[in-house]
Amino acid sequence: MAGFLDKAKEQAQRGLTQGKQKLDEVQAQRAGGDLLKKLGAAYYAERSGTGSPEATQTALRALEAHIATNGDGFLHS
C-alpha cells in the first residue's frame, strides 16, 4: 500500500511541476507580447512625431532583455 501511495504522490508532484512550468511559459509569452506592443506603440509615436527615438530604444532594450531571458517563442505563436 505504501508503494501505491508513494507513486501517487510522485505523480501528483510531477503534475504540479508541469502545471507550474506551463503557467510560467504562458506568463512569459504574455509579457513578451506586451513588450512587443509597447515597442510598436513607441515606434508609431516616434514616426508620427509624438514620440522620441529614446522611448523606442528603451522599449527595444526591454524586449531584447525579455528575449534573452525567456526566448523568442512568443514571436512564433
Image: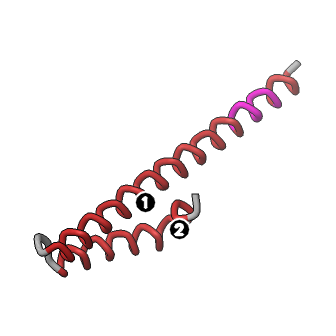
Q: Is residue 74 left or right of residue 11?
A: left
* Along the viewing direction, whichever of 20 and 63 lies nearer the viewer: 63
Task: Please state which amino acid type lies under the numbered disc 1.
Answer: Gly
Residue depicted at x 46% and y 48%: 27
Q: Dot 1 corresponds to which residue?
A: 32
- Disc 1 is placed on an element classified as helix
Query: Position of 48 compared to 5: left or right?
Result: left
In the rendered image, residue 24, in percent from the top left (x then y), is placed at 52, 49
Relative to residue 44, is residue 34 depicted above or below? Answer: above
Span highlighted in magenta in the image? 7-13
Above or below — where is 21 with respect to 9?
below
Label 2: few (<14), some or many (≥20) within 10 Å?
some
Residue 59 magenta-drawn?
no
Quadrant (top left/top right/bottom left/bottom right) for the C terminus: bottom right
The answer to whether mark 2 and mark 1 are in CB contact below 8 A is yes
Give the CA separation, mark 2 to mark 1.
8 Å
Task: Please name the residue that numbered disc 2 is placed on.
Answer: 72
For residue 16, side relative to residue 66 (left or right): right
Q: Mark 1: few, some, or many residues within 10 Å (few <14, many ≥20)?
A: many
Q: Vertical placement of 69 versus 9: above or below?
A: below
Q: Is residue 17 left or right of residue 43?
A: right
The quadrant where residue 22 appears = top right
- Confirm whether the magenta stretch covers residue 9: yes
Give the mark nearer the N terminus: 2 vs 1: 1
- Image point 79% across, 27% down: which residue? 8
Label 2 sits on a secondary structure element that is: loop
The residue lying furthest to the front in this view is 48
Amino acid at pointer 2: Asp
Residue 19 percent location from the top left of the image? 62, 39
